[in-house]
Image: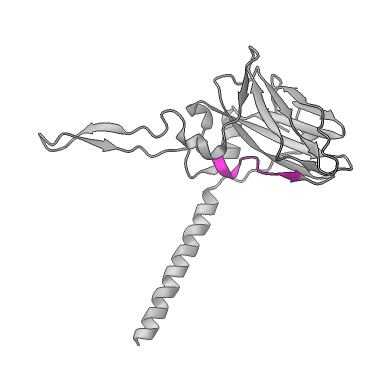
Amino acid sequence: MPVVNNRLTVLSIALFVSTAAVRSADKEPRFTAGSASSYPTRQTADKVTIAAVPYVTEEQVRLAFGKVDPNRYGILPLLIVIQNDSAQALRLDTMRVEYVTFDGRHLEATPAKDVPYLAGAREPRITPAPIPGGGSRVKHVKNPLANGPIDVRAFAARMLPAGDQASGFFYFQTVSRHSGKAYLTGIQEAGSGKELFYFEIPLSNNGTP
C-alpha cells in the first residue's frame, strides 16, 4: 500500500510540474518577425537585405514582450531581420550593431543578459521597520526585466545559410526613439571571410508589415 501511495505522489508531482510549465509557456507572448523585405526601414546590398525596426509603440511592445516594456526603463529594443539571398552562408558572430543617435553618437548594444542589471533596476528600497526601535529593513524590489522575454527575443544567430533568414532584438540605452539610424558592420562570407559592405538604415520611417 505505501508503494502505491508513493507512486501516486510522484505522479501528482510530475503532473503539477508539467502543468506549471505549460502555464509558464502560455504567458510568453508569441512573436514572429516578418520578412526583411516587408519592413520600410531596410537596406539591400550584395543580395543581403537587413531591416531594422525600433519597437516603441504600445502595440509593438505588447506583441514582442507582453507586459514588459523595456522603453520604460530607458532601453530601446531594436528588431534586426536579415535575409540572405546570396549564394554564400554568412557569419553573424562577427556582426556589430550600433544605434546612431540624431546627433551622430554611436551607441553599442547592451547584451540581453545585462539588461536587467542596468541603473536602478535592482536598487533596494529602505523601509522603516514595523517595530519601534527596530531600525530599517532593506526591501528588494522585483526586477520586471528579469526572467522575461528580453533574453528569449535577443538576436542569437551566429551563422546564416544561403536563402535563409534570421531575426532578433538588440537593446540600447537611449532616450532617442525615431530619429536615429541602425549601423551594422562585420558580416562576413563564411567561405571566403570577405566582409560585406556596412549597412546604415534610417529609422525615421519606422513601421511594421
Q: Residue furthest left?
A: 133
Q: Quadrant of residue 50?
A: top right
Q: Quadrant of residue 33?
A: top right
**Which residue range is magenta in the image?**
150-159
Residue 145 visible to the viewer: yes
Q: Nearer the viewer, residue 37 or 174?
A: 174
From the viewer's perspective, is 131 left or right of 121?
left
Instruction: Specify whether residue 155 is painted magenta.
Output: yes
Q: Is residue 197 above or below residue 168?
A: above
Q: Residue furthest right?
A: 87
Q: Residue furthest top?
A: 103
Q: Position of residue 20 (x, y in %)?
A: 47, 59
Q: Nearer the viewer, residue 196 or 179?
A: 196
What colour scheme does the image use? one colour
Q: Position of residue 14 (x, y in %)?
A: 46, 69
Residue 66 visible to the viewer: no
Q: Quadrant of residue 11?
A: bottom left
Q: Position of residue 123 (x, y in %)?
A: 36, 32
Identify the image quadrant of the N terminus: bottom left
Name the residue: 54% across, 52% down.
26
Q: Residue furthest bottom?
A: 1
Q: Nearer the viewer, residue 208 or 3?
A: 3
From the viewer's perspective, is 202 left or right of 46?
left
Name the residue: 53% across, 40% down.
113
Dominant secondary structure, magenta: loop
Instruction: Specify whether residue 19 is painted magenta.
Output: no
